[in-house]
Amino acid sequence: MRSGNPALNDKTFLDIGSGAVVDRGGAMTVNGTVNRTALLLIISLVTAMFTWSRFFAADGDPSAVMPFVVGGAIGGFVVALVTIFKKNIAAYTAPLYAALEGLFIGGLSAMFEAQFPGIVLQAVGLTFGVLAAMLIAYRTGVIRATEKFRMGVVAATGGIALLYLVNIVMHFFGSGIPFIHEGGAIGIGFSLVVVVIAALNLVLDFDTIERGVEAGAPKYMEWYGAFSLLVTLVWLYLELLRLLAKSRE
């Protein structure tokens, strides 16, 4: 039971079983996870609207939202780490993560929108379109989360993460990996590959959550499952935003 998402992997449900369910007053369900995912998306939307409106109220001045963008990104990363290591408090940390990511995404999206009008609506539509397509493909058995499939997606996800890490380090020395941020055939091709890998991670997340339900995971894991799905959706949205921007360039 493995997912490329760092919040969901083969050890996520190892320490929880039917005995823990009795203590938590209920078991994890798919519907419960879906409802909590929807709530987290709403929270993200509300805070994203705040930084979005603040950006355009300041006539497109990035300095008006940059503290929220940076604070949301760093704060979201810290809260995500806390959630991963303290799953039992996900009911409190997951909404906080959603709010912080909303601040980050809202400001960043506004900057893209100012440069490429209409791009955010396209990215949002594609994100939910991919989510629906992957869910249908998983539920109908078109895509099966076999062990080889999991290993391939996890390896690809790890490779992308390593590439991004190298790029960050290179930026400290005044350079970087060109095709990650620049347009052109190679840059667009790279972004397409990353989008596909992010989409395939959704399939692994669905499978891992379903296995958690079958294992009788405690109720608080619904919040954790919702948090993990939001992590993947945020990554997918950002990559789609980057891809669309490259294609317009």
Image: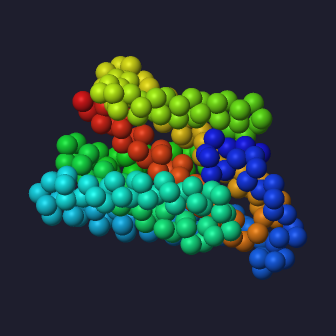
Q: Nearer the viewer, residue 116 or 64?
A: 64
View extreme (left): residue: 59
Q: Nearer the viewer, residue 198 or 61?
A: 61
Quadrant in the picture for residue 45: bottom left
Q: Position of residue 77 (x, y in %)?
A: 48, 54
Identify the colour scheme used: rainbow
Against 189, is 3 above or below?
below
Q: Residue at x 43, y 47 (%)?
A: 237
Q: Position of residue 46 (x, y in %)?
A: 37, 69
Q: Nearer the viewer, residue 197 or 102?
A: 102
Quarter of the image where the N terminus is located = top right
Q: Position of residue 194 (x, y in %)?
A: 49, 33
Residue 14, visible in the rendered structure: yes
Q: Residue at x 73, y 40 (%)?
A: 145
View extreme (right): residue: 19
Against 106, is 118 above or below?
above
Against 40, is 244 above or below?
above
Q: Residue at x 31, y 60 (%)?
A: 68
View extreme (top): residue: 185
Against 63, is 222 above or below?
below
Describe residue 187's horizontal placement relative to residue 129 as left or right: left
Quadrant in the picture for residue 103: bottom left
